[in-house]
Image (cartoon, helix red, strand yellow):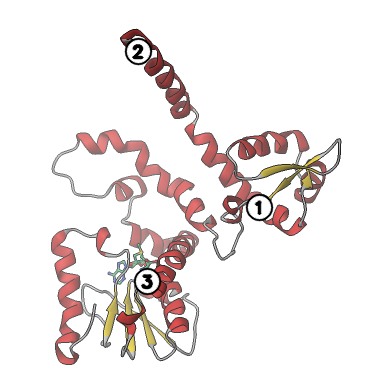
Amino acid sequence: MGDMEVTIKEEARAEIKIWNYVFGYAKIAAVKCAIELGIADVIENYGSPMPLSELASTLRCEPSRLHRIMRLMVHDRIFKQEPINQHTVGFSSTPLSRCLIKGGEKSKTAFILLMSGPTCLAPWHSLSARVLETGNNISPFEVANGKDIWSYAEANPDFSELFNNAMGCKARLTVQATIEGCPEVFDGVENLVDIGGGNATALSLLVKAFPWIRGINFDLPHVVAIAPKSDSIENVGGDMFMSIPNADAAFLMSVLHDWDDEECIKILKNVEKPFQKIKGRL
Ligand SMILES: C[S@@+](CC[C@H](N)C(=O)[O-])C[C@H]1O[C@@H](n2cnc3c(N)ncnc32)[C@H](O)[C@@H]1O
């Protein structure tokens, strides 16, 4: 291939890519719309390819508008289009659309709604200002929303619930992999504290897989106040920078990345304190 041909191909690729940037938000907007309308739930429950007319009447949507959204999602392989008869096609589920079913095993709806909602999107709008700034350590979230994320969650219960559910989506995936990949780390552990355990999704899976464990779900008071209650898990509210409940082992998932090095050292020293007495495992 000559230099000229390479340049033409690169320019064509650049042209395609730039339009993806221009309209990149449309895909996430369609997915958000699908979650809010419950499109994946309705199609999954229908059990066979669902015609547009039925989908529109079940969702009480204007069919031509719904059709435009569905076309985008079929193009993105979120839903499949399959023949029902010679004249009609219908929409079917895929593994991807099952991630958009509310409350499903593989559901990622809470995470998508969290990240595509105005509170989490706002900081991204001032990314360039953040890059230009020097000497200001206030997080972009706080600049955009007026409070750090944990205080914001405390003051906004709906955001807090969505955040905890979003973390649950991720925890279901990663904790299952931990249970399957390294069950031996839980041998002999009678009580386990999950530091920053949110709504206790991780602990619920762990105590189910290793029923000899008693769990302590430790998080900020407003978080544990609404965490589900269970016989094998105690919810304890507190501040990990002050002290952490005693246990033979501590579980810390997706927590340290939120803090700078000095703060992480403080948390880990607080984890270490009760362990010095009982030779624990982190
Ligand atoms: C990113 S989430 C991770 C949740 C959970 N570990 C998971 O991976 O799904 C961080 C958690 O740390 C909690 N957290 C923040 N500051 C805390 C503090 N000072 N003491 C205890 N928990 C705190 C938050 O409320 C939140 O539930």
- Kindly tell me whether residue 222 is visible in this rendering: no
What residue do we see at 34% from left, 62% from top?
Answer: 150
Instruction: Using the image as rendered, state which of residue 132 and residue 19 is in the foreground.
Output: 19
**x and y, in percent, of residue 266 in the image:** 15, 70
Label 2: few (<14), some or many (≥20) within 10 Å?
A: few
Picture layout, residue 126 above or below residue 59:
above
What residue do we see at 15% from left, 75% from top?
Answer: 269
Q: Which of marks 1 and 2 is in front?
A: 2
Residue 40 badge? 1
Instruction: Using the image as rendered, state which of residue 138 and residue 194 is in the foreground.
Output: 194
**x and y, in percent, of residue 78 in the image:** 60, 45
- Separation of residues labelled 3 and 1 (CA atoms): 31 Å
The quadrant where residue 262 appears: bottom left
**x and y, in percent, of residue 276 in the image:** 14, 87
Query: Is 266 positioned to the left or the right of 63 in the image?
Result: left
Q: Quadrant of the N terminus?
A: top left
Which residue is labeled 3 in the image?
181
Q: Quadrant of the C terminus?
A: bottom left
Q: Along the polypeptide, which appears first: circle 1 or circle 2? A: 2
Q: Which amino acid does label 1 sit on?
A: Ala
Residue 217 badge? none
- Separation of residues labelled 3 and 2 (CA atoms): 47 Å
For label 3, the SS is helix
What residue do we see at 51% from left, 58% from top?
Answer: 110
Residue 7 badge? 2
